[in-house]
């Protein structure tokens, strides 16, 4: 019987509708469904098995290749679509992942509940928190053969979504920009570390020019190496491999940098496969062979991150040692009076949680610690937090907020001393590939750090040669050593951070030279300052003199304050080290007061200094103590009269009120 044209159309529409309905149903990978193509069916099964194996090894790119081959044979299998979605989720192609999960559950809404967790995670990563919560709530009603902790995880992520919605109501005023191709590439870049004035950047990457050029077994990616870049005219130069001896033929990763950029912490696995922290130091223009930090910093457990305090006397580090609160915790170890590391201390159970804390960075202010955590309230994965040391304890950590934090892992945050820019590792859809390094510009001027960054160069006055020198910083009010630093042996460069609220005495000395003295009295209210100095040291020659900027007397009195002892001790050491020297030690006043009175006061003050030097074992015959009063002003009264502000006038008078010594003989016996 021949069908009419109208009947043929109806039959065709029915057939199309049947086919389309079939296409929307789950087609299991059963032999009975593919009787006409057994060979390709077996290939598809093998591809799925190999994809599963790669997933177990976290090689999601390789797994995706295998799964997609199987999917081209049968695109209507719910679980396979969900597996592909998982791969895209791990590879941060979130939109693709979300669509695949939607397709998978349309094909079969009875899939394992663990895939609902992934479906919800894709919505969470897309900032669609309401739909994410919906999927997590559904997941809690499902069973899972894959994940026995399904309900616990779903509840945690629901809390993350609720918390995220709150953070989105009060975003931070900042700008996040991916660093360009001089830093980021199609490979992975992560763990940026910077020096305090943000002129040097070190980071970890996996590239084809890695030392040795090898692929790491089981990772299908290159070994980690450390790369570096410098900022010139506000732009980062093309990053280069730091090379040997820092990089080896295996994994070498950045974890921390001293604020002056002279000491670099790196992470390596030891022969037992346990990760430890090593340190390399600049020796002129090269780096020393990395050495493991001693116990109690490294242990038989894993240590993953470290940073110095500004004074170099304390190392903060991360370890999973069992005495912690759980997972990875933050610890600190400080040097004792003998220069050895004392017992490691858990930083605070207020800061550490039963989950992981990692990727630590202590700001140049010496009291603000930034870290990543999974245990405090987060938007998802790791978020970045800060805690501040005040009145003997660390504050309750504060989430750094949106958009700095996101539903993905946000880690390895570092901040320039000025507080203007930070850098961190993140995975974003706009990235060059995998993990990338981003710059954060903080647009508000609130809560800027209170510190003074001193950057300088030490040179010899006669030759202009750059000098290796020892720099000592004293807290004059507390009469204690704040820290000891060194200038680079080739460049003479140094950088020191001085937190506000202290009166600092600075002494710079180099072998064969007179020392240099300066005072920095930085009130607690002082905002961030960057001071650049060229420190010129004179040879030990007759006629050369040093202004002692950290000699203090009470007003209108000749009694030495105890805070002057550190400064005069430098003179003591110089005379002991050079027994042939004889010096004139003089004090000077400003021009206020009568000439007679100023002369008498300055003579008494010079004799107070002399008495201290004698008490420290220096022969009286080696010192001539003279009070010059106002007879040798650095700034004349006529010059002072030209000044317009009270601050300028007082500063001029202060420069006239000084103590100094001058070499008058080098043949004393």
Image (cartoon, grey):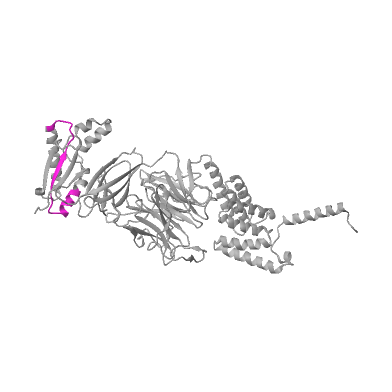
**Quarter containing the C terminus:** bottom left
Is residue 144 rendered to the left or right of residue 504?
right
Query: Which one is in front, 67 or 637?
Result: 637
Query: Which one is in front, 268 or 145?
Result: 268
Q: Say above or below: 594 vs 127.
A: above
Q: Say above or below: 501 vs 467.
A: above
Count the numbered circles shown. 0
Query: Which one is in front, 254 or 383?
Result: 254
Whole-percent x, y for residue 360 in the image: 42, 52
Q: Residue furthest bottom?
A: 39
Q: Is residue 321 visible?
A: no
Does residue 107 belong to the magenta stretch? no
Tell me the residue at 88%/54% (across/down). 4
Query: Which one is in front, 343 or 384?
Result: 384
Q: Say above or below: 333 vs 248.
A: above
Whole-percent x, y for residue 551 in the image: 20, 42
Whole-percent x, y for residue 549 in the image: 22, 43
Q: Which residues are magenta?
A: 569-595
**Quarter containing the N terminus:** bottom right
Q: Residue furthest right?
A: 1
Q: Is residue 517 visible?
A: yes
Is residue 144 rendered to the left or right of residue 471?
right
Is residue 62 rendered to the left or right of residue 602?
right
> What is the quadrant of residue 275 in the picture?
bottom left
Whole-percent x, y for residue 345 in the image: 37, 54
């Amino acid at each position: 019987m021949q069908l009419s044209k109208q009947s043929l159309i109806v039959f065709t529409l029915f057939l199309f509708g049947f086919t389309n309905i079939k296409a929307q149903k789950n087609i299991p990978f059963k032999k009975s469904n593919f009787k006409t193509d057994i060979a390709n069916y077996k290939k598809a099964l093998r591809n799925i098995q190999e994809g599963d194996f790669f997933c177990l090894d976290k090689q999601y790119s390789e797994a995706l290749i295998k799964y997609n081959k199987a999917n081209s044979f049968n695109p209507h299998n719910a679980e396979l679509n969900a597996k592909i979605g998982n791969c895209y989720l791990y590879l941060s192609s979130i939109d693709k992942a979300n669509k695949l999960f939607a397709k998978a559950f349309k094909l079969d809404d009875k899939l394992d509940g663990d895939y609902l967790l992934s479906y919800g995670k894709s919505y969470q990563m897309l900032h669609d928190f309401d739909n994410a919560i919906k999927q997590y709530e559904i997941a809690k009603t499902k069973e899972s053969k894959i994940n026995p902790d399904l309900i616990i995880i779903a509840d945690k992520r629901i809390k993350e979504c609720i918390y995220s919605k709150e953070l989105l109501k009060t975003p931070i005023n900042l700008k996040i920009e991916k660093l360009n191709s001089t830093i980021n590439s199609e490979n992975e870049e992560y763990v940026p570390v910077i020096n305090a004035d943000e002129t040097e950047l070190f980071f970890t990457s996996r590239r084809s020019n890695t030392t040795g050029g090898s692929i790491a077994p089981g990772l299908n990616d290159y070994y980690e190496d450390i790369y570096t870049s410098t900022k010139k005219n506000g732009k980062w130069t093309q990053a280069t491999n730091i090379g040997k001896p820092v990089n080896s033929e295996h994994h070498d990763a950045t974890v921390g940098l001293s604020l002056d950029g002279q000491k670099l912490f790196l992470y390596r696995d030891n022969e037992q496969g346990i990760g430890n922290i090593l340190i390399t130091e600049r020796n002129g223009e090269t780096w020393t062979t990395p050495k493991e930090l001693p116990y109690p910093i490294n242990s038989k457990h894993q240590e993953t991150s470290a940073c110095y305090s500004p004074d170099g006397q304390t190392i903060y580090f991360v370890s999973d040692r069992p005495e912690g609160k759980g997972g990875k915790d933050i610890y600190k170890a400080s040097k004792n009076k003998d220069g050895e590391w004392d017992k490691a201390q858990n930083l605070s159970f207020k800061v550490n949680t039963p989950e992981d804390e990692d990727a630590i960075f202590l700001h140049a202010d010496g009291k603000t610690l930034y870290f990543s955590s999974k245990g405090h309230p987060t938007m998802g994965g790791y978020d970045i937090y800060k805690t501040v040391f005040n009145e003997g304890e660390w504050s309750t950590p504060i989430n750094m907020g949106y958009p700095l934090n996101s539903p993905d892992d946000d880690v390895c945050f570092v901040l320039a001393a000025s507080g203007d820019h930070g850098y961190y590792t993140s995975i974003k859809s706009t990235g060059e590939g995998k993990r990338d390094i981003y710059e954060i510009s903080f647009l508000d001027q609130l809560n800027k750090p209170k510190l003074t960054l001193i950057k300088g160069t030490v040179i010899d006055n006669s030759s202009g040669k750059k000098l290796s020198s020892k720099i000592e910083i004293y807290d004059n009010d507390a009469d204690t050593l704040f820290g000891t630093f060194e200038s680079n042996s080739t460049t003479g460069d140094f950088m020191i951070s001085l937190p506000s609220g202290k009166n600092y005495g600075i002494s710079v000395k180099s072998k064969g030279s007179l020392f240099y003295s300066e005072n920095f009295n930085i009130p607690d209210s002082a905002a961030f300052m960057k001071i650049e100095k060229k420190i010129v040291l004179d040879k030990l020659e007759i006629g050369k003199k040093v202004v002692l900027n950290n000699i203090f007397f009470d007003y209108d009195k000749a009694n030495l304050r105890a805070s002057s002892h550190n400064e005069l001790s430098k003179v003591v050491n110089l005379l002991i080290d050079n027994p042939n020297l004889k010096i004139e030690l003089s004090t000077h006043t400003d021009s206020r007061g009568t000439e007679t009175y100023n002369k008498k006061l300055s003579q008494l003050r010079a004799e107070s200094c002399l008495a201290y030097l004698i008490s420290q074992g220096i022969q009286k015959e080696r010192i001539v103590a003279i009070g010059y009063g106002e007879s040798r002003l650095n700034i004349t009264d006529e010059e002072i009269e030209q000044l317009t502000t009270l601050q300028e006038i007082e500063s001029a008078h202060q420069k006239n009120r000084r103590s100094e010594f001058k070499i008058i003989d080098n043949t004393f016996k």
